[in-house]
Image (cartoon, rainbow, N blue to C red):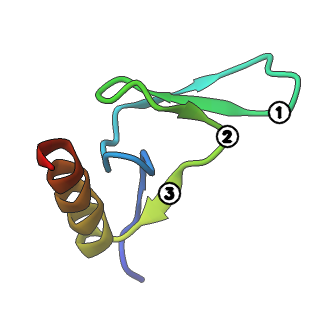
Amino acid sequence: MEKTFRVCPRCGSNSIEEIFGSIMGQKYKCKDCSYEGPLIIEANKELVEEIKENYKKRKEG
């Protein structure tokens, strides 16, 4: 079975924390890009790298 990682959907960082007490359910916050929302991505190493590369391109563009 391939190893997967829980990462931020915006920047691909695994520096995410769960925020409890949200009215709509679980919420997450990324410590690297300040994303806040109900979604995180469970991805393999290749997908994590793709998310990080896309984020880098968006920041530069």
* C-alpha separation, residue under disc 1 versus residue under disc 2: 8 Å
Secondary structure type for disc 1: loop
Label 1 neighbourhood size at 10 Å, few (<14), some (14-19), many (20+)? few
Quadrant location of the N terminus in the rendered image = bottom left
Q: Give the residue at the far right of this rendering.
A: 23
Q: Which amino acid does the dot numbered 3 rest on?
A: Ile
Residue at x 80% of width, y 16% of height: 21
Horizontal side of 31 relative to 17 (left or right) equals left
Horizontal side of 58 relative to 11 (left or right) equals left
Q: Which residue is mark 2?
A: 38
Q: Which amino acid does the dot numbered 1 rest on?
A: Gly
Q: Which residue is mark 3?
A: 41
* C-alpha separation, residue under disc 2 versus residue under disc 3: 10 Å
Dots 1 and 2: beta carbons under 8 Å? Answer: yes
**Residue 58, disc:** none
Secondary structure type for disc 3: strand
